[in-house]
Image: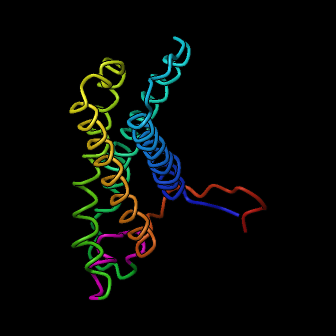
Amino acid sequence: MEITLRALITLIHGMLFGAFFLMAIYGLVVELFRSAYVGQPSNLSSKVYSLERFYLICTVGLGWAAVLTGAYIIYPWYRAVPPAGVTDLALYPRFLLKSSATTAAWHDLGMEWKEHIAWIAPIAMTMVAYILTKGRLSLRTHPQVRTAVLVFALVALGAAGVAGFFGAMLNKYAPINGGTTIHLKGKSQ
């Protein structure tokens, strides 16, 4: 059992940073909806507020980790230009996708959307986390701010979902491979 270094980093980018970011935002959206319908706000201890702050900071960190690893590590591998005369495009995902009419749209639509919309998710989530850590108690008295926070959290969830979907589809049709081979189990042959 083996995996290439590039495939491992892509896996960490998508399945660790991206997937956990999506789950954390979803949990936050559910909590924001729930808290909007609670009649009496609960009196939480300072320890619980500290845990909430930690949750929000970790969520933002996961979002930025996903976007930054995608933009500055994986994206250059995706856009690598094959040397003249190369016919096997397996190590050049962008050119592999564009080489066939049936997969070219994955680059033209999928990657163009992914590379732009992915940045919206951590930006929106950073705003949400800031408002919730600095003014959590005032959300009850300012319903417009609570609504805005919920909308930004939904925008972050939607943007991360679109980026994750296109990332998974792009990796299915043109996986990022190459680099050192890491042997996980068994012997190399």
| Residue visible at 37% across and 76% down in the picture | 89
- Which of the colour schemes (rainbow, by chain, secondary structure, one colour) is used? rainbow
Which of the pair 135/93 is nearer the observer?
Answer: 135
Query: Where is residue 81 drawn, in percent x and y?
Result: 27, 66
Q: Position of residue 103 (x, y in %)?
A: 32, 82
Residue farthest to the bottom?
Answer: 101
**Identity of the residue drawn at 30% across and 45% down:** 121
Q: Residue at x 37, y 57 (%)?
A: 161
User: Does the magenta portion include 93?
Assistant: yes
Image quadrant in which the N terminus is located:
bottom right
Q: Quadrant of the C terminus?
A: bottom right
Image spot of residue 116 (x, y percent): 22, 54
Residue range highlighted in magenta: 89-101
Q: Quadrant of residue 112?
A: bottom left
Q: Outermost residue, right direction?
A: 186
Residue at 78% over, 61% down? 186
Q: Residue furthest top?
A: 46
- On screen, residue 134 versus residue 169, left or right, reads left
Give the image quarter of residue 76. Answer: bottom left
The answer to whether residue 97 is above or below residue 24 is: below
Q: Does residue 93 appear to the left or right of 147 in the view shown? A: right
Left or right: 116 with respect to 88?
Answer: left
Is-magenta flag for residue 80? no
Name above or below for residue 7 compared with residue 153: below
- Coordinates of residue 38 in the picture (x, y in percent): 44, 33
How many callouts does the rendering have? 0
From this view, report whether residue 101 is shown above or below residue 13. below
